[in-house]
Image (cartoon, coloured by chain):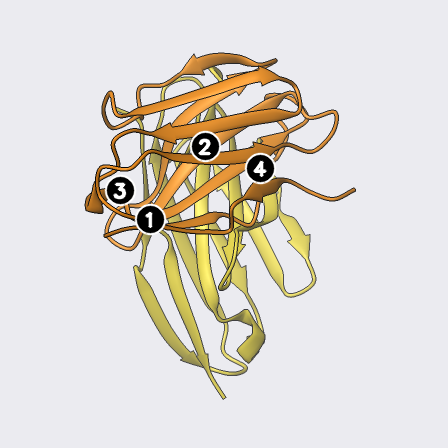
Amino acid sequence: DAGVIQSPRHEVTEMGQEVTLRCKPISGHNSLFWYRQTMMRGLELLIYFNNNVPIDDSGMPEDRFSAKMPNASFSTLKIQPSEPRDSAVYFCASSKMPGAPLLFGPGTRLTVT
Amino acid sequence: EDKVVQSPLSLVVHEGDTVTLNCSYEVTNFRSLLWYKQEKKAPTFLFMLTSSGIEKKSGRLSSILDKKELFSILNITATQTGDSAVYLCAVESRDDKIIFGKGTRLHILP
């Protein structure tokens, strides 16, 4: 199995631009989570989905952030417009079902200048 | 508000030492506690604990959960330089949310 796949691996963009991060969970995994990691705040949960349905998006910092999961094999996290404080590593993780361990993708390192 | 607190935040020991990392939590409707190891890349899964008092073991690493006192420990015996990493504790609640502590940064000196 290829594991969780994220793209791009690195993204550098200018303030005000739209950024789209992509995630393909492990085949057969029904739960998908998006996290953001910074030195100051650690790993923060942004949003999670079960069976493609968003369950809790209370961690999404503001309306500039949105996430979708149109099908079982694809999810996106969009930031529009981006700001320098959005610079972080964004991880996608999936699990077979609630109660099973999360397996993480390699992350996307986002730098907003 | 649910939270996970890890201690110490950082730890430096010599190769061969034994270390104990701590994780305390407050969560509504606890389901499980998980430990992860993060080197320069993504976190990798170590243990999942759901029952009090039952030790999980993998090589030199072991972990135990106390659901009454709301904490877990991760022990590493005979540490090696390859154990240097950030160790993350996470808690899952019954609404499927998984939140992480800030981690313990462990550095092993040769």
Count of all numbered marks drawn on residues in the image? 4
Mark 1 is surrounded, within 10 Å at the Cα level, by few (under 14), some (14 to 19) or many (20 or more) other residues, namely some
In space, the residues marked 1 and 2 are separated at their CA atoms by: 13 Å
Disc 1 vs disc 4: which is toward the camera? Answer: 1
Residue A104 x %, y %: 57, 43
Which of the 4 image quarters holds residue B54? top right
Say whether residue A60 is left or right of residue A68: left
- CB within 8 Å, label 1 to label 3: yes
Q: Amino acid at mark 1?
A: Ala
Chain whose colour in the figure is yellow: B
Question: In the figure, B81 relative to A96: above or below?
Answer: below
Residue A88 - label: 1
**What is the quadrant of the N terminus of chain A in the image?**
top right
Q: Are marks 1 and 4 on the same chain?
A: no
Residue in the picture at 52% in, 52% down: B42
In space, the residues marked 3 and 4 are separated at their CA atoms by: 33 Å
Q: Are marks 1 and 3 on the same chain?
A: yes
Residue labelled with disc 4 = B49
Residue labelled with disc 3 = A86
Residue labelled with disc 2 = A34
Q: Amino acid at mark 2?
A: Trp
In space, the residues marked 2 and 4 are separated at their CA atoms by: 22 Å
Mark 3 is surrounded, within 10 Å at the Cα level, by few (under 14), some (14 to 19) or many (20 or more) other residues, namely some
- CB within 8 Å, label 1 to label 2: no
First in sequence, mark 2 or 3: give its number. Answer: 2
Q: Amino acid at mark 4?
A: Leu
Q: Amino acid at mark 3?
A: Asp
Mark 2 is surrounded, within 10 Å at the Cα level, by few (under 14), some (14 to 19) or many (20 or more) other residues, namely many
Mark 4 is surrounded, within 10 Å at the Cα level, by few (under 14), some (14 to 19) or many (20 or more) other residues, namely many
